[in-house]
Image (spheres, rainbow, N blue to C red):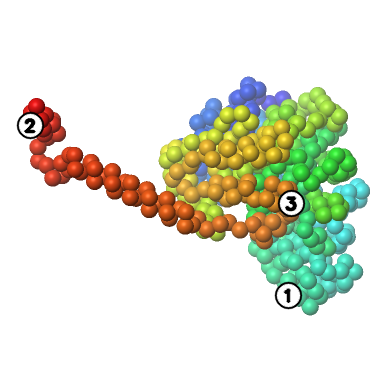
Amino acid sequence: MFNKVLIANRGEIAVRILRACREVGIETVGVFSEADRQALHVRYADEAYLLGPAPSRESYLRADKIIEIAKKSGADAIHPGYGFLAEREDFATMCADEGITFIGPKPSSIAAMGDKMTARETVRKAGVPVVPGTEDVGNLHDEDLLSIAQTIGFPLLIKATAGGGGKGMREVRNIEEMPELIKSARREAESAFGDGNVYLEKLVEGARHIEFQILADGHGNVLHLNERECSIQRRHQKLVEEAPSPFVDEELRQKMGNVAVKAAQAVDYVNAGTIEFLVDKDKNFYFLEMNTRLQVEHPITELITGIDIVKEQIRIARGREMTYRQEDIKINGTAMECRINAEDPFNNFMPSTGMITTNLIPNGPGVRVDSGVYPGFEISPYYDPMIAKLIVWGETRAAAILRMRRALEEYRIVGVRTNIPFHQMLMNSHRFMGGQFDTRFIEERFMVQEERNEADEEIAAVLATLVAHNEQQKASQFVMRNERDTSNWKWVGRWERMHR
Ligand code: MV4
């Protein structure tokens, strides 16, 4: 049982975790880099400590320093959030060795799911469907890959064993182009993960990305909180998530949910985690990977189930048993999340940095904003560009979309470019509204319209005319300040005497 939690993260997720700790009466310790001295998570923590310079390697990835701060401050637990140290087996082990509770799964579960080829084999043996591909683990040489490819058939995918996130992944259309693609996949995987091992899977085309939230306690209870639809993404970065998925019916939900629980059980999972699936147009589903951490998009599951996932993580890490069973988990309405990024949708989603001067946050019925910024905060180029999550709930999917449009209109961020206009266009797209999209939708079918259009130019011309007219009117009534050497008081006095 712990009473003081160190939050080894920054930004909106650090704030989210701090809030949960506050509400349950747990003391908090924050950590920050030199770029984050003024950050919200530093203000909200009971106490906060400097880690080092802005780059993550010198601050938020310094496992040794974070453990040292935990010991110095008397923190007896660490919540890693997402990213940074969240899925590092060695960090979870270091915590255990120091007698600090890691609020997350066991190191062995992190390891088993961190290696994608091992994960695939482990869950396959537990009866979880995986995409047809290479079987059993071990270093596959180029000749093995080429011969196995013939039995799998084309098109197929080369994937990095240490991978995830699409790094080191290559689409192969025929055997001729395969040797070259194996080489480049290995090269990319080696430089990204220090591990050039790859394996093969048949390519599932036009699939959706659907994931199941898992909660497991230390008493053998494993349950799922239903699915999230995550197909709206660009270059493996999710942009919009919704729960439940408009594509999943009750029958498919039950089947996938049961399989997700089996996958978690296969690695003896404890705490919150997520099972990712590919689902093809015929509703065949395949295990992709497991994320052994809290996810960015967890709030949409919170809104449809009424369960506070971060508080559950804390309860589970404290050794408590879950107070509900699978049949108690119900879905209420639809929740949707837009990731608000400091990037320019009209310039190839280029990251945008600078000081936020205005930050008008939408609120009102059914709106939640998880954010780590405020007016005066500087967006630096050191960390990921997500500055807030705009999350809405609606009784139906249509109501959620209408509410998201309203909330996006209310949102005003000045100082950096944001992807809010992208989200507004998406919320008006007929395909999105109809639920007709897969993982290729944004990159292949959805065009971000030009920012400047004729209507805008006309409006700008009318505005400029009005401003010029207004200025001229003022000029005809008053002498311009710089053309006058008398004080305003004297000048008004004279003017009034003259007009008496
Ligand atoms: C696939 C696939 C199609 N077939 N595997 C991308 C990242 C990594 N987690 C797995 N990924 C994929 N694996 C097979 N056998 C398509 C993808 C994929 C994808 C998956 C989820 C969300 C977005 C995606 C975008 C492109 C490709």
Distance from the alpha carbon under mark 1 to that under mark 3: 35 Å
Foreground: disc 2 or disc 3: 2
Marks 3 and 1: in contact by CB < 8 Å? no
Residue plotted at (80% across, 66% down): 156
- In this view, 390 is above or below 205: above
Q: For the residue labelled by badge 3, is the local secondary structure a helix, a strand or a loop? A: loop
Q: In this view, does 433 lie to the left or right of 60?
A: right
- Who comes first in sequence, dot 1 or dot 2? 1
How crowded pointer 1 is (Cα within 10 Å; few <14, some 14-19, many 20+) is rated as few
Q: For the residue labelled by badge 2, is the local secondary structure a helix, a strand or a loop? A: helix
- In this view, 76 is above or below 451: above
- Who comes first in sequence, dot 1 or dot 3? 1
Estimate the x, y position of residue 232 in percent, counting from the top left: 68, 51
Distance from the alpha carbon under mark 1 to that under mark 2: 90 Å
Q: In the depicted view, which residue is nearer to us: 230 or 260?
A: 230
- Who comes first in sequence, dot 2 or dot 3? 3
> For the C terminus, which image quadrant?
top left
Q: Which amino acid does label 3 sit on?
A: Gln
Q: Is residue 255 left or right of residue 493?
A: right
Residue plotted at (64% across, 31% down): 366
Give the image quadrant in which the ligand numbered 1 is located: bottom right
> For the N terminus, which image quadrant?
top right
Distance from the alpha carbon under mark 2 to that under mark 3: 74 Å
Estimate the x, y position of residue 61 in percent, counting from the top left: 59, 46
Estimate the x, y position of residue 234 in percent, counting from the top left: 64, 55
Residue plotted at (26% across, 45% down): 471
Q: What residue type is labelled 1?
A: Glu
In the picture of the structure, the residue carrying the numbered disc 3 is 436
Q: Which amino acid does label 2 sit on?
A: Met
Q: Residue 180 carries which label?
A: 1
Residue plotted at (42% across, 40% down): 357
In the picture of the structure, the residue carrying the numbered disc 2 is 498
